[in-house]
Amino acid sequence: MYNCFPVIDLRATGKNIIALREARGLTVKDIQNFFGFEEPQAVYKWQQGKSLPTVDNLLALSFLLGVTIEKILVYTIPNNKEQQAKTCCSVFYPFFTLHIAHC
């Protein structure tokens, strides 16, 4: 069975970060202070889907929001040929082992 390689949907993930933050009653300033950022721009970029937190920051954010990393990230599988050619590799899952073959 071959599937397309999933990619993170930056905008949907940003909206998800906003929803999770608000559900916890946190402000952007709260997240800024938690991370020790001098300015809130990084948090705004995450929320606007312009960038993602680093892996370390994503882990810390998951603890702050009280969810797993998987609950923060929103992924998509590109469905048109042009997107697949740019971002996709075939993924084969025999015996629960991941093998990646280039498209």
Image (cartoon, rainbow, N blue to C red):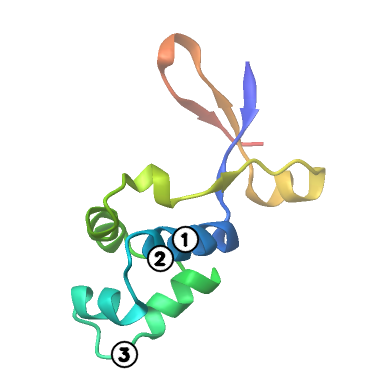
Report which quarter residue 12 is drawn in: bottom right
Give the amino acid type for the residue marked by disc 1 in the picture: Ala
Residue ID for mark 1: 19
Residue situated in front as seen by the camera: 100 or 57: 57
Tag in front: 1 or 3: 1
Q: Is residue 86 left or right of residue 102?
A: right
Q: Which mark is residue 22?
A: 2
In contact (CB < 8 Å): disc 1 and disc 2: yes
Instruction: Look at the image and tell me whether residue 63 can be seen.
Output: yes
Mark 1 or mark 3: name the one nearer the start of the chain: 1
Residue at 79% of width from left, 50% of height from top? 82
Q: Which residue in the structure is indicated by mark 3?
A: 39
Residue 97: horizontal and vertical position, in percent? 41, 18
Left or right, 42 with respect to 1, comes to left
> Which residue corresponds to the image point at 42% horizontal and 15% vertical from the top-left?
96
Check disc 1: other Cα within 10 Å, few if <14, some if 14-19, many if 20+: some
Secondary structure at numbered mark 3? loop
Q: Look at the image and tell me in which quarter the C terminus lies.
A: top right
